Image (cartoon, rainbow, N blue to C red):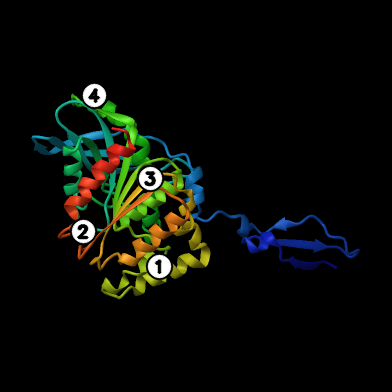
């Protein structure tokens, strides 16, 4: 007669348990792992740990139309491709974005820019990064700001709202890996400029700050990073916080998140548990009148970084809103340019 014994162990606690079979003599035969426990789930490849081990390939950057011609810089539409599945290097998708190249000719450092949330129906290339990018270009930096999947001329993202969010990390990682390909693009388009591939910084605003922080955790690389009002709270609270503004008050999103948490450990996707992995210098700017990212979020984040002995500068602007207006925007960009030049040794 066959008896079934369920053994709860450390492996069981981790989400895997074994079925042990015993014969009539009471001896335990070889255990077998339940198939469903071994089966990889679709979003497993997006955990911070998994992405830190993924092979994110550098891709070719191509230039499109000229979007602006300022005496100090030229703006272009640019395109690159991201892996639809970072674990298999398959299913590539096109992403568009905004590129600024300083004038006159020279060799320049690069700032990769990640915008915050913008309603898709109102979005066009450059929204959320354009003004700061122009000031950085005037300050002597090439800037790249990806639109992300589903925006601008980019291909569509996943149909899953959670996966769409996680795909932003793959896009961000890919553009950072591909920066070195800019010199080929400049040569093909007769642009008399070059980038210094080892002089790359990151700028992020709001949710773009959350992307910047997550990228620093995934890579562990020394990308000097400037963040304006970064979303720094744990996932999924970091998105559920904003559901009051939804037409359905977040009912559908809460259902999506609940379904996600049935199958996945949200902590593995949440930046707040991986701050110790960051090895880059950071500069944070926060308005005290910000009603989108509360001041206390940045206060608490900076306090955590200080406890971890991270290299961080923190500036607050009295009465300034989410965009650091009215009194914070100008000093913030000046401080950012100085920070990038200092940390990148330019």
Mark 1–mark 2 distance (CA, rounded to whole Å): 22 Å
Identify the residue under disc 3.
Answer: 281
Label 2: state its secondary structure.
Answer: loop
- Sequence-wise, which precedes: disc 2 or disc 3? 3
Identify the residue under disc 1.
Answer: 237
**Crowd band around label 1 with a 10 angstrom C-alpha radius: few (<14), some (14–19), many (20+):** few
Identify the residue under disc 2.
Answer: 323
**Crowd band around label 2 with a 10 angstrom C-alpha radius: few (<14), some (14–19), many (20+):** some
**Crowd band around label 4 with a 10 angstrom C-alpha radius: few (<14), some (14–19), many (20+):** few
- Sequence-wise, which precedes: disc 1 or disc 3? 1
Mark 3–mark 4 distance (CA, rounded to whole Å): 32 Å
- Sequence-wise, which precedes: disc 4 or disc 2? 4
Image marks 1 and 2: residues in contact by CB distance under 8 Å: no
Mark 3 or 4: the one toward you: 3
Mark 1 or 3: the one toward you: 3
| Disc marking residue 187 | 4
Image marks 2 and 3: residues in contact by CB distance under 8 Å: no
Question: Is residue 153 among what the camera can see?
Answer: no
Mark 4–mark 2 distance (CA, rounded to whole Å): 36 Å
| Disc marking residue 13 | none
Q: Quadrant of the C terminus?
A: top left
Residue 165 found in image quarter:
bottom left
Rendered residue at 30%/65% (across/down): 295
Residue 58: where, in percent of width, then height? 38, 35
Q: Is residue 79 left or right of residue 299?
A: left
Mark 4 or 2: the one toward you: 2
- Sequence-wise, which precedes: disc 3 or disc 4? 4
Question: Is residue 188 among what the camera can see?
Answer: yes
Rendered residue at 34%/46% (across/down): 225
């Amino acid at each position: 007669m066959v008896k079934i014994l369920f053994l709860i162990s450390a492996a069981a606690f981790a989400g895997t348990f074994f079925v042990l079979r015993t014969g009539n003599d009471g001896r335990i035969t070889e255990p077998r792992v339940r198939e469903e426990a071994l089966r990889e789930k679709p979003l497993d490849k997006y955990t911070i740990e998994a992405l830190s081990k993924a092979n994110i390939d550098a891709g070719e950057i191509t230039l499109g139309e000229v979007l602006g011609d300022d005496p100090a810089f030229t703006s272009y539409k640019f395109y690159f491709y991201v892996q639809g599945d970072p674990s298999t290097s398959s299913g590539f998708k096109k992403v568009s974005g905004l590129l600024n190249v300083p004038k006159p000719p020279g060799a320049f450092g690069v700032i990769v820019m990640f915008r915050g949330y913008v309603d898709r129906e109102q979005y066009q290339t450059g929204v959320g990064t354009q003004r700061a990018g122009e000031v950085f270009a005037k300050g002597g930096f090439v800037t790249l700001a990806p639109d992300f999947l589903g925006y601008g001329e980019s291909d569509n993202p996943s149909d899953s709202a959670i996966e769409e969010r996680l795909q932003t990390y793959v896009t961000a990682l890919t553009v950072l890996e591909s920066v070195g390909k800019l010199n080929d693009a400049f040569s093909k388009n007769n642009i008399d400029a070059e980038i210094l591939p080892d002089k790359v910084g990151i700028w992020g605003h709001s949710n773009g700050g959350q992307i910047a922080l997550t990228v620093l955790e995934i890579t562990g690389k020394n990308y000097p990073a400037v963040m304006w009002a970064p979303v720094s709270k744990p996932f999924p609270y970091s998105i559920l916080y904003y559901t009051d503004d939804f037409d359905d008050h977040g009912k559908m999103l809460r259902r999506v998140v609940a379904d996600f948490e049935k199958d996945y450990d949200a902590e593995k996707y949440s930046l707040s548990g991986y701050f110790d992995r960051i090895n880059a210098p950071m500069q944070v700017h926060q308005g005290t009148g910000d009603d989108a990212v509360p001041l206390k979020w940045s206060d608490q984040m900076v306090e955590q970084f200080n406890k971890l002995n991270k290299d961080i500068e923190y500036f607050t602007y009295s009465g300034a809103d989410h965009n650091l207006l009215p009194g914070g925007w100008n000093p913030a960009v000046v401080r950012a340019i100085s920070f990038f030049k200092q940390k990148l040794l330019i």
